Amino acid sequence: MSGKYLALHKYLANRYADTVVLTFADIEDLLGFTLPNLARVRPDWWTGTDATSAPSGHTDAWRLANRTARPNLLAQTVVFERAT
């Protein structure tokens, strides 16, 4: 894992809890930059299920940490669950 989402990957990879809940502000603090607008309005930005968009490495941050992401856009939070 490398790139601008590395700090999020390291954070998630080093958590022992099976469930980690972060606010968008928490994630931005970890990353040191503002999340893209799509992250705030499109759940598929987090889940990687949009077949029409180009592949992006941001989902590797949690996938390589063996996590899934479930966003709550209204609450501006993301639940990262350990994948089984």
Image (cartoon, rainbow, N blue to C red):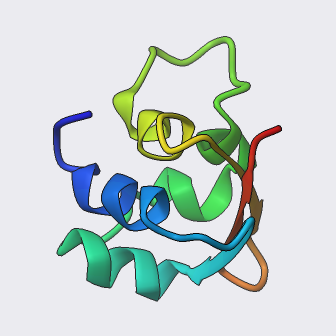
Residue at 60% across / 40% down in the picture? 66
Which one is in front, 84 or 2?
Answer: 84
Which one is in front, 26 or 53?
Answer: 26
Residue at 62% across / 46% down in the picture? 46
Residue at 54% across / 56% down in the picture? 39
Q: Quadrant of residue 18?
A: bottom right
Quarter of the C terminus within the rendering: top right
> In x, y percent, where is residue 28?
34, 77
Report how many numbered discs are placed on residues in the image. 0
- Residue 76 vertical position relative to residue 61 in the rendered view, above or below: below
Quarter of the N terminus within the rendering: top left
Q: Let me know if residue 12 appears in the view.
A: yes
- Residue 72 vertical position relative to residue 5 in the rendered view, above or below: below
Instruction: Indicate left or right for 27 with 47 as reference.
Output: left
Which residue of the protein is positioned furthest toward the front in this rendering?
16
> In x, y percent, where is residue 56?
40, 25
Instruction: Indicate left or right for 21 with 3 as reference.
Output: right
Residue at 48% across / 62% down in the picture? 12
Q: Let me know if residue 77 appears in the view.
A: no
Q: Quadrant of residue 55?
A: top left
Instruction: Indicate left or right for 21 with 72 as reference.
Output: left
- Residue 73 vertical position relative to residue 76 in the rendered view, above or below: above
